[in-house]
Amino acid sequence: MSEIDRMLAANAEWAERFPGSKDVRPARRVAVVACMDSRMPLFQMLGLEVGDAHVIRNAGGVITEDVVRSLTVSQHVLGTREILLVHHTQCGLQATDDNSFADLVEQATGRRPPWAVRAFRDAEDDVRESMRLIRESPYLLSREVRGTVYDVDTGVLREIEDPAAPHHSQAGGGPLQRGQDR
Ligand SMILES: [Zn+2]
């Protein structure tokens, strides 16, 4: 049986216990931007239920033009106001760099991708960079953003301090475990 057949069978079971319709607008008015990593079950690890949040995922959880597009729809059309960023330890994007990745694709296909893969060395630094890109986006209604790194070996989500945050000293009090001040 192919993996997709297994997923279709699992969906038949899901539909049996389907909890019912929800509002298209996320109940908790939050959008999560996260890496696509298979070890991050975002709804479980963040205590989210169906209908609670938008989840926008890509390789690395980096802020691309399309992530901004989704966040803009999320806020202007569907009412979200807070953004949580979730990077993680042992990310696949830490195992390459933009040039090596483009070389790899070009050698295999004969075509060099016109886009950068957006590799990074340090997940914390990239979370801060992502927070900066969101704050600088001219299209969002709310730039309430907080960043985290998830440890794929322990399940602990650690908040990343951002000295550039406008309300840095007032950002505490949430359910997330906070990182050390630097
Ligand atoms: Zn990743």
Image (cartoon, rainbow, N blue to C red):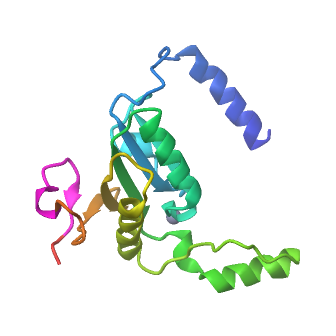
x and y, in percent, of residue 177 in the image: 21, 57
Q: Is residue 178 shown in magenta?
A: yes
Image check: 182 left or right of 72? left
- In percent of the image, x 47 and y 16: which residue is there? 19
- Magenta segment boundaries in residue numbering: 168-179
Residue 174 vs 157, above or below: the answer is above
Q: Nearer the viewer, residue 26 or 121?
A: 26
The answer, for residue 75, to whether it is visible in the render is yes
Quarter of the image where the N terminus is located: top right
Q: Is residue 170 left or right of residue 158?
A: left
Q: As displayed, is residue 127 above or below residue 69?
A: below
Residue at 51% across, 54% down: 68
Task: Please report the residue visible at 35 percent of the width from the left and 35 percent of the height from the top.
Answer: 29
User: Horizontal and vertical percent for residue 158?
Assistant: 27, 61
On the image, which quarter does residue 128 sit in? Answer: bottom left
**Percent of width and height locating residue 35:** 50, 58
Nearer the observer, 123 or 1: 123
Q: Is residue 162 magenta?
A: no
Q: Is residue 89 above or below residue 174?
A: below
Q: Quadrant of residue 124?
A: bottom left
Residue 94 is situated, as x and y percent measured from the top left of the image, at 52, 77
Q: If the image is split into quadrants, where does the C terminus sit? A: bottom left
Q: Is residue 152 visible?
A: no
Name the image quarter holding residue 164: bottom left
